[in-house]
Image (cartoon, coloured by chain):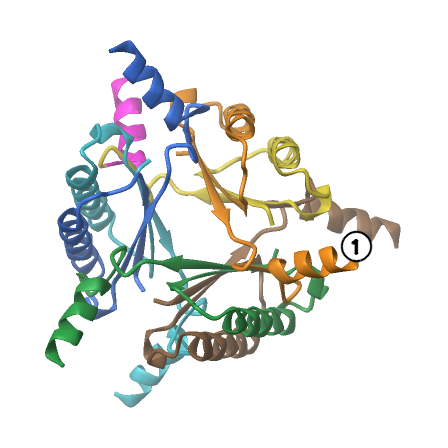
Chain colours: A yellow, B cyan, C blue, D brown, E green, F orange
Amino acid sequence: MPSALIDGPKIDSLDVKRTFIKEVTDALEKAYGLPRSIYVVLIKENSPENVGVGGELILDKINRASNKK
Amino acid sequence: MPSALIDGPKIDSLDVKRTFIKEVTDALEKAYGLPRSIYVVLIKENSPENVGVGGELILDKINRASNKK
Amino acid sequence: MPSALIDGPKIDSLDVKRTFIKEVTDALEKAYGLPRSIYVVLIKENSPENVGVGGELILDKINRASNKK
Amino acid sequence: MPSALIDGPKIDSLDVKRTFIKEVTDALEKAYGLPRSIYVVLIKENSPENVGVGGELILDKINRASNKK
Amino acid sequence: MPSALIDGPKIDSLDVKRTFIKEVTDALEKAYGLPRSIYVVLIKENSPENVGVGGELILDKINRASNKK
Amino acid sequence: MPSALIDGPKIDSLDVKRTFIKEVTDALEKAYGLPRSIYVVLIKENSPENVGVGGELILDKINRASNKK
């Protein structure tokens, strides 16, 4: 602690995760001023069939968008 | 935000998820009165070996129940 | 469990909370089909100075909106 | 509720989970003094590529440690 | 990390919190086998008007129970 | 969504919160590549009597440190 829990879609690239964790930790360190070693960042990857925005599944939004093409 | 994070067992049916997300969003919209597009609902599916109720794994409760039959 | 954790702004009315909890529980019961007594709904009220959307504090959005009037 | 949400690495042994859930529930029961049946413990298992400590992925820490050998 | 996030009602006694944190950490240490210094336990105290069980506010359950006396 | 939930000690300065939210959102935007308006960052401030690290309350660590002076 302090810790950051991130909920988002899947991130495919390990490099993106690496940079993301570094940058969130930079922001944590600047905000709290505690030793860098104690910050924890946790990425949670969610499937589009388990997330709803505005009352609609992300999965359905994606399907509708790809049908429009 | 506002957001709802749901922790429960696996939901097999996509239609159940669809209706569930819609209904939780309806309740959010009624409670907070903000534009519908901003509500987020997140379903987390948990394995019965990772949940304990009353100090006992759900997995063990299920196994005991099916052994009784 | 199953449980719903709601993060949003402050809700002033106890009646709104009462109805909201009832409706989310109705949705949970319909989705999971387990005994009603086990569903837990938890409301977390957040101050506008602790929530950012689009990189800006809600507090600052509110202040800007009221200055425009 | 009360509930405990545990975030950690994968636990391979079912027996370890069983004992862990029992012990956390014992601690909950002692602290809150409510009927044992209502305590919920939820274990979340995280991949080493989704956790950062001190700004570095656990995955990279593990790899560096095994390269040193 | 590993961490435990506890959601429950208010705990009035500092000693109860002290013992509780110690015991949950003991359980974490036994389950994960990592250095004791890295386990984090976080207690969240919730008001009875913000928690619903079985579709009813804890506040209303408490009031009903005290009216019965 | 995506969203970041931050758990830490109290942050007294509004400017620190403002910068922190901006920087975490920058990191989210870079990692996920979605429209900036949808990222949510939530800061949770915790009292030192509700957080344990290594089995000891932060409150007790602080008190011990100030007694040493």
Residue C35, can we see it?
Answer: no
Number of dots carrying numbers: 1
The amino acid beneath tag 1 is: Lys
Residue at 47%, 71% in the rendered image: E13
Could you tell me which chain the residue with mark 1 belongs to?
F
**How would you rate the neighbour count of disc 1 (Cα within 10 Å): few for under 14, some for 14-19, many for 20 or more?**
few
Tell me which secondary structure the magenta stretch mostly adopts.
helix
Would residue C19 appear left or right of E41 to someone viewing this image? left
Whole-percent x and y of residue E18? Answer: 57, 70
Residue at figure coordinates x 43%, y 68% from the top left: E12
User: Quick one: B28 or F14, which is closer to the camera?
Assistant: F14
Residue E9 is left or right of residue E58, and the answer is: right
Q: Quadrant of residue B12?
A: bottom left
Can you say which quadrant of the picture contains the C terminus of chain C? top left
Residue C40 percent across, percent down from the top left:
27, 61
Query: Horizontal placement of F57 versus B20: left or right?
Result: right
**Observer-nearest residue: E68 or A39?**
E68
Single out the residue that lies furthest toward the right. Answer: D69
Give the extent of the magenta segment: A56-69
Measured along the vertical axis of the image, is residue C39 above or below residue F20? below
Quadrant where the N terminus of chain C lies?
bottom left
Q: Is residue A59 magenta?
A: yes
The answer to whether residue A60 is magenta is yes
Q: Residue furthest top?
A: C68
Q: Tell me the SS state at disc 1.
A: loop
Position of residue B2 measured from the top left corner of the image (x, y, whole percent):
30, 38
Rendering coords of residue E45 (x, y %)? 40, 59
E50 above or below F6? Answer: below
Q: Write down the residue under mark 1.
A: F69
